[in-house]
Image (cartoon, rainbow, N blue to C red):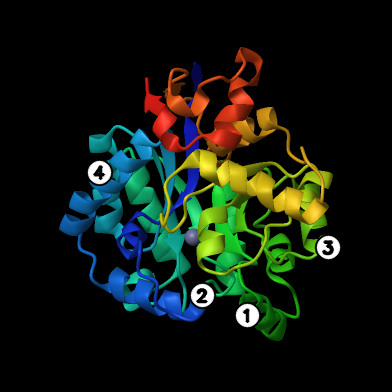
Amino acid sequence: MRLPGFVNAHSHAFQRALRGRAEGGDFWAWRDSMLALAGEQTPERVRREYVGVYREMRAAGYTAVGEFHYLGLDEARAAAEAAEDAGIGLVLLLAAYGRGGLDRFRQPSVEAYVGQVERLRADGVAVGVAPHSVRACPREWLEELGRYANAEGLVLHVHADEQPREIEESLAEHGLRPVELLAETGCLGPRTTVVHATHAWDGELDLLAEHGARVCLCPTTEANLGDGYAPVERLRERGIPLCIGSDSNVRIDPLEELREVEGIARRSALRRNVVPPEELLRLGGPEGAAALGLAAWDDVEADTAHPSLAGVEADDLRAALVFGCGADVLAPV
Ligand SMILES: [Zn+2]
């Protein structure tokens, strides 16, 4: 059974190396380990290790990936080469990082950041603009990045509302919640994808809907890091388009991400079929492609002779894929 390939709209491939590392009391403790690992990356290591991660994605049915990258320009080029090698489509979401994090994450100015994006575009790399978060980008940066992405017709991806602390800091600095600040600085539009939105208030979700912005959910990572529950029903009520990402790559399985999206929704709503199976499949593939600005990406084949699908009626196969299978039923075409 042939399907559009799954699209991984949010990945940090280097974090795959933290799989199984169970230490750390919360997100912020995990972030310390992540920063230590980020500090060790080189273009050679990215080139070598990302190939393995992208092959794992490809084998799991993802045929395109949005790599949200904050490790430097040479490493960005290495990531693009690794994707090419692994045969997965890639959009390099180059992170703009104005403050905090590690030295290597930061550009000296927003103009320097735009210069990096332009160089990647000149090299033929598909790129998106990615203010890392309202934590990492001052207001003036957000204003310029919103303006630039809009003028160039580029997608804009940004983390927001993953953790309560980020919201408290944004309120203290700006008197605004993260999505409110993104709206005010011109960062929200139909080419915008907000990653997580876990703790978004109704007013923030209204802003996303008004501007036609999307949300990328990363449920296996959000579970692993203790982020919270995605507000699936409140997103859907507003017609906000959703897509999925493997984010930290603690797990690489689009069917599991989709099952989690619906599982969270059902547990919260106390009913079934909150996001119907056909819609889940659409957000696993075409909606992710739209979030990345991709017009074309490879299909995948689901093996209907796989034991996980034994005894399933033909009409139920697509739903059984989401609710009863792992990525081992999927293979690249
Ligand atoms: Zn992320």
Relative to 61, 272 lies left or right: right
The percent coordinates of residue 253 (x first, y second) are 45, 43
Secondary structure found at label 2: helix
Q: Name the residue under label 2.
A: 27
Q: Give the Cα separation between the discs numbered 4 and 2.
A: 28 Å
The percent coordinates of residue 152 (x first, y second) are 53, 43
**First reached walking from the N terminus: tag 4 or tag 1:** 4
Q: Name the residue under label 1.
A: 165
- Quick one: label 1, few (<14), some, or many (20+) residues within 10 Å? few
Closer to viewer: mark 4 or mark 2: 2
**First reached walking from the N terminus: tag 4 or tag 2:** 2
User: Cβ(mark 3) to ligand 1 < 8 Å?
Assistant: no
Residue 203: assigned label: 3
Q: Give the Cα separation between the discs numbered 4 and 1.
A: 35 Å
**First reached walking from the N terminus: tag 3 or tag 4:** 4
Find out whether the residues at labels 1 and 3 contact each other: C-beta distance under 8 Å. Answer: no
For the point 56% across and 75% down, the residue is 135
Closer to viewer: mark 1 or mark 2: 2
Secondary structure found at label 3: helix
What's the residue type where badge 3 is placed?
Gly
Q: Name the residue under label 4.
A: 82
Closer to viewer: mark 1 or mark 3: 1
In the rendered image, the vertical position of residue 225 relative to residue 122, given as above or below: below
Q: Residue furthest left?
A: 44
Find out whether the residues at labels 2 and 3 contact each other: C-beta distance under 8 Å. Answer: no
What's the residue type where badge 4 is placed?
Ala
- Quick one: label 4, few (<14), some, or many (20+) residues within 10 Å? many
For the point 75% across and 80% down, the residue is 175
